[in-house]
Amino acid sequence: MQQSFIKSIEQAALAISQSDALVILAGAGMGVDSGLPDFRGKQGFWKAYPMLEQTGHSFTDLANPEAFEKTPELAWGFYGHRLNLYRKTTPHLGFEILKDWATTRPGGYFIYTSNVDGQFQKAGFDEHSIYECHGSIHHLQSLNGKGNIISADGFEIEVDANTLRAKDLIHSVDNGELLRPNILMFNDWYWNDTRSLAQQQRYKDWLIPLRSRKSKKVAMIEIGAGSALPAVRSQSTMIRNWLDSTYIQINPQLAHKADIGIALGALEALTNINAVIEAMR
Ligand SMILES: NC(=O)c1ccc[n+]([C@@H]2O[C@H](COP(=O)([O-])OP(=O)(O)OC[C@H]3O[C@@H](n4cnc5c(N)ncnc54)[C@H](O)[C@@H]3O)[C@@H](O)[C@H]2O)c1
C-alpha cells in the first residue's frame, strides 16, 4: 500500500466503523474487478466490443429503443451478450466486504446504482434495499412500455460472438410481441419505470428520516461512478449537500471533491479499508 493512500484509507475505515447508516453508490467501475467492462468513452466501449468498432456502432446507437425496432438482432446481440455475461459473473470479494459493513449498521443501508447488471442482488444484498436508477437487464418489458415488467429468468439468448448478432430474439409467451430489457436507454420515451419508481420510493422512505435524526452518523461510499452519464455522482453530491454525512469516493480517476478520496480500484480499496476496520475491532 502506497504511503499516500494510508491516511485516506484510515479516515474511511473510521467513518464507516462509526457510522449508524450506510449509503452505497455504485457505477460501472464497481464491476471491473469482477471482470466486467465499463464503457468509458467510445474507446472504452470498443475495447469491450471490438467487433462494433469495425461496424462503427457506438454505445448510444445500441442502447436505444430505436435499435430494437430497426436492428433487433444487433440490439438483442448487445444486450443478450451482456445478460449472459452478468449471469455467469461472480461478484468480487469487495461486495462481501460491503455487505458485512452494511448489514451491521444499526440504521441499515441502501444501494443507489446505475448498474443494470444485478450484481448486488447476486452478492446477497436485500432486493428491497437496492435502487437501480437505470433499471435492470434481468427484467423485460414491451417495446411500447405498456403491460407488465417480467423477469428475464428462464429466457435464454444465444449471440454470435463474431458479429454480436442474436441468433434468436426474446418474445412474450403471452402475445408473441418482441420484448426488450427494462433499462433506461438513450432517447427512451418507452421505458417502463414502474419497478424503478417503487425502488425509488423505498429509497426515499429510508433516506429522508435520516436527516431529522441528527444523532445518526451517515457514511456514503461512492464506487466506480463515471462522469459521462453522471447519475451516480450527482446523487452523491446531492446527498452530501442535503444530509450531514461523510462522503467517501473510490475511483482510480478521482473527480470532484469528496470528503475522503481513494484513487484505487474497488477491490483494493475495500480490502484495505476492511483490514484497518478489522484491526480496530
Ligand atoms: N455493469 C453495468 O451494469 C454497466 C456497465 C457499463 C455501463 N453501464 C451503464 O453505462 C452508464 C455509465 O455508467 P458509469 O458512469 O457507471 O460508468 P463509466 O463506464 O462511464 O465509468 C466507469 C468509472 O469506473 C471507474 N473505474 C474503472 N475501473 C475501476 C475499478 N477497478 N474500481 C473502481 N472504479 C473503477 C472509472 O475511472 C470510471 O470513472 C450507466 O448508465 C450504466 O447504466 C452499466
Image (spheres, rainbow, N blue to C red):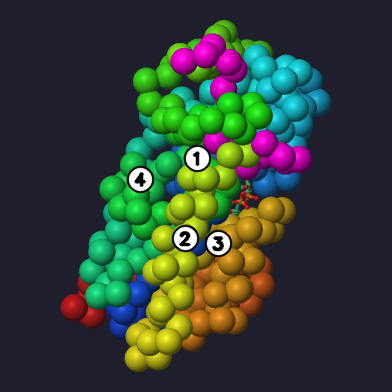
**Is tag 3's residue or tag 1's residue first in the polypeptide sequence?**
1
Amino acid type at image mark 1: Ser
Quadrant in the picture for the N terminus: bottom left
| Start-end of magenta stretch | 174-190
**Is tag 4's residue or tag 1's residue first in the polypeptide sequence?**
4
Q: Residue farthest to the right?
A: 56
Give the Cα separation between the discs numbered 3 and 4.
22 Å
Give the secondary structure at mark 2: helix
Instruction: Report if the CB atoms under discs 4 and 1 are less than 8 Å apart.
Output: no
Residue at the spot 40% in from the left edge and 91% down from the top edge: 214
Q: Residue 247 location in percent, x, y?
A: 50, 76
- Residue 264 in view, yes or no: no
Q: Which residue is mark 2?
A: 201
Give the Cα separation between the discs numbered 3 and 2.
28 Å
Question: Label 3 crowding class (10 Å Cα cut-off): few <14, some 14-19, many 20+?
Answer: many
Q: Which residue is mark 4?
A: 121
Give the secondary structure at mark 3: loop
Residue at the spot 63% in from the left edge and 58% down from the top edge: 231
Q: Which residue is mark 3?
A: 251
**Is tag 2's residue or tag 1's residue first in the polypeptide sequence?**
1
